[in-house]
Image (spheres, rainbow, N blue to C red):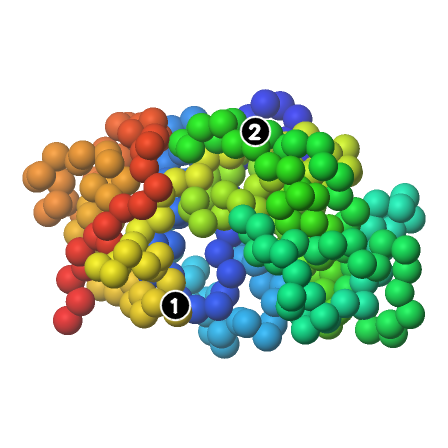
Amino acid sequence: MPATTGEYVGRFAPSPTGPLHVGSLLAATASYLQARSNKGRWLLRIEDIDPPREQHGAADAIVAALEAYGFEWDGPVLYQSHNTSRHREVIAHLMGTGYAYRCGCSRQTLAGGATGPVGRIYPGTCRAGTRSKRTAIRVRTDNVPVGFHDLVQGPQTMRVEAESGDFVIKRRDGLVAYHLAVVVDDLEQGISEIVRGIDLLDSTPRQIYLQRLLGYRPPGYAHIPVAVNSLGQKLSKTTGARALPLESPAPILFAALCALQQSPPADLVTADVATIWDWAAEHWALERLRGHRHVAEPPQPYG
């Protein structure tokens, strides 16, 4: 159930598409320290609702890496796939109220359409109905601006209909789409603030739009800079980001704090993980990230 006491509840919600890398570590570290500095709870949620993209054993590897780096989450590890029945109930509600509809358009059908900041803009082709037997479900959008104040990136505004169009909440293959699942789970887990990478900044207005349709109170948002490699590419599996080594995590955690502009004292580099976390929780300052969209990949002692 949602938090009702005003307590801070944060979360880290990786998808099990591969092992954690240093970019993932920055997001986890920032969300963890933001929760701890606010004397709040920090939840770990594995977003395992896209089996075709998942890597076997990745969920366990993510948990093991977080343990090795000294993260301590509150309560059991949560798995998004365990809540699919609730996701489908919400989709049925949106269909029943007329806020969502079936769409038979394929990617090929939409290939020649206009594009916006978040990709292909759906033109509303199936709003009046479709005869296709294999359909996705889209949420009906409007052109009312969605605005929010990001704690790192400042004021943000997006017109969802103009910049993305009606977006998918259930895929043609029957799987629940990311935006719907994350909105429902954040509410039910009482998340009060979301700290994540700036690569997800464009997703936020669509999620706030869904929250409004469902009568949910939006959490706060803070989108931190992403780590980029020497070519300026966001660190990811597709750009060759390497898995975090589980041996000697302390120097890598120290480097992550440096990348997050926290300026830890030089002698902390030889400390153990627990000591580094103690210092970081006491000195954490999210505001030092303001104005930053990218940071250089922290050095890592790979063999």
Q: Residues within 10 Å of mark 2 (few under 14, many from 20)?
A: some
Q: Position of residue 233 (x, y in %)?
A: 32, 59
Q: Position of residue 150 (x, y in %)?
A: 48, 31
Q: Residue at x 91, y 70 (%)?
A: 131
Depicted 107 relative to depicted 21: above or below: below
- What number is the disc on residue 237? 1
Q: Is residue 215 left or right of residue 177?
A: right
Q: Residues within 10 Å of mark 1 (few under 14, many from 20)?
A: some
Depicted 219 relative to depicted 102: above or below: above
Residue nearest the viewer, comparing 168 with 302: 168
Depicted 127 relative to depicted 201: above or below: below
Q: Which residue is mark 2?
A: 148
Q: Position of residue 211 (x, y in %)?
A: 70, 38
Task: Specify whether residue 140 is in view.
Answer: yes
Extreme-left residue of the structure: 267
Residue 146 sits in quarter: top right
Q: Position of residue 143 (x, y in %)?
A: 72, 37
Q: Residue at x 81, y 68 (%)?
A: 104
**Which amino acid type corresponds to the residue marked 2 in the rendered image?**
Phe
Q: Nearer the viewer, mark 2 or mark 1?
A: 2
| Quarter in which the N terminus is drawn | top right
Residue 196 sits in quarter: top left
Q: CA distance from mark 2 to mark 1?
A: 30 Å
Disc 2, SS: strand
- What number is the disc on residue 7? none
